[in-house]
Amino acid sequence: MTGGRPLLRFQVLGLVFLAVLAGLGWLTVEIYDKAFTSVVPVTLRADRAGTQLKANADVKVRGVLVGEVREVTVRPGGVDVHLALDPAMTGRIPRNVTARLLPKTLFGQRYVSLVLPASPAGKITSGAVIDEDRSAGAVELEQALRDLLPVLQTVQPQKLASTLGAVSQALEGRGEELGTTLGTLQDYLARLNPEVPQLQSAISKFADTVRTYETAAPDLVDALGDLRSTATAVTRQQQDLAALFTTVTGAADDTHGFLNASGGTIVSLSADSRPVLDLLAEYAPELPCLADAAAKLVPTVDKALGAGTNQPGLHVELHVKPAPAQRTPPTVAKGPKCYSAGSAAPPTANSPAEQQLFSELLAPVYGVSPDDIPGWSGLLLGPVLRGTEVTLK
């Protein structure tokens, strides 16, 4: 029995020690939560942005800490932010004060900034309700912060801090150079300002050009599609094309060898053919007459050969006459003649073909149709173009 009493005493002392530790822990938490601190509780009615406030967030007036956020509760259409104000500071805070929810830094958490009115009305008391600042400046600031929030959420703070640090180090000790650069930039802008209207006009014309390209885009896409089809076809036939190029190359080599071997002969042949070609050119007007005479001779030949009759064969009447007393000397050729008609070949001067040529030449000069050029114009213009003169009597 005597040995069991010290064990029981130690157990009781252990329980007391644990209770003391628990009490000290609870006391520490309560002191941290300022449960024993006298405060003035007030309520801030804010919109949904109030949900971004955290417990123990600061409450400031013109940058001076006057309290903290104790709790944020959601209500229909907004939130109620329960504030705990320092009693020593409430004497400087009027009851018609308003509040803004601002971030401490670019990426910092929000805090409550109390905005003092232009006309204070008494001091704030326990249980007072504070409205959110709805002035134009506050609304614009809140809208700017809302627009900036997605960017801030996308940008990684550590990388931005590293970038800003690098920029700070790069600019350190270069203030004078930066000032000179800004001055130069100001000069450039001063020179650029008078050209702004022309720049706007150029941008407007560029916009018109872009719209033109936009209109032509479908055709351009179709053209690219056709080009793609062509390129595909060429790709598929590349072996045939390669064979064709090889054949053409071989033919070109053969032609080159032939010309090297026979070039002199070809030149001599061309020189020897010149008189013959000149003679053919001289008698060229006779060719239409010859063809016409041959065409007209077809019925006579058919009749002489008995075409279309039951007596095919040559039908001619041969008359024998005595030879003349003497031969007449052969006549010398006097140029192209149409012997079937017994007259010379029709001249080209004042011909319908020449008149048509003159009409085509004069029509653009007078701005009229070739059919409106009078027929007698060739009588005046023809001799001039042939190097002769027209004399009016």
Image (cartoon, rainbow, N blue to C red):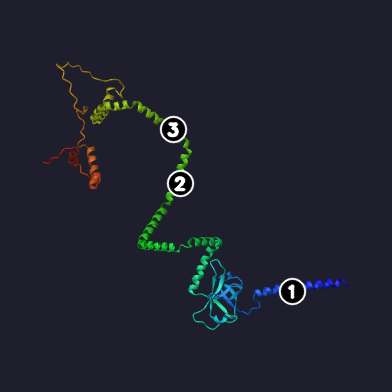
Drawn side of residue 333 relative to residue 218, left or right:
left
Residue 47 vs residue 320: left or right?
A: right
Q: Residue at x 43, y 51 (%)?
A: 218
- Is label 3 in a helix, a strand or a loop? helix
Label of residue 20 in the image: 1
319 over 65 or under it: above or below: above
Amino acid at dot 2: Gly
The nearer-to-camera label among 3 and 2 is 3
Q: Name the residue under label 3.
A: 246
Q: Which quadrant of the rendered structure holds the C terminus?
A: top left
Horizontally, residue 113 falls left or right of residue 371, namely right
Label located before the other in sequence (3 or 2): 2
What's the CA distance linking mark 3 and mark 2? Answer: 30 Å
Q: Name the residue under label 2.
A: 225
Image marks 2 and 1: residues in contact by CB distance under 8 Å = no
42 w.r.t. 148: above or below:
below
Whichever of labels 2 and 1 marks the residue nearer the N terminus, that label is 1
Q: Earlier in the sequence, mark 1 or mark 3?
A: 1
How packed is label 3: few (under 14 Cα within 10 Å), some, or many (20 or more)? few
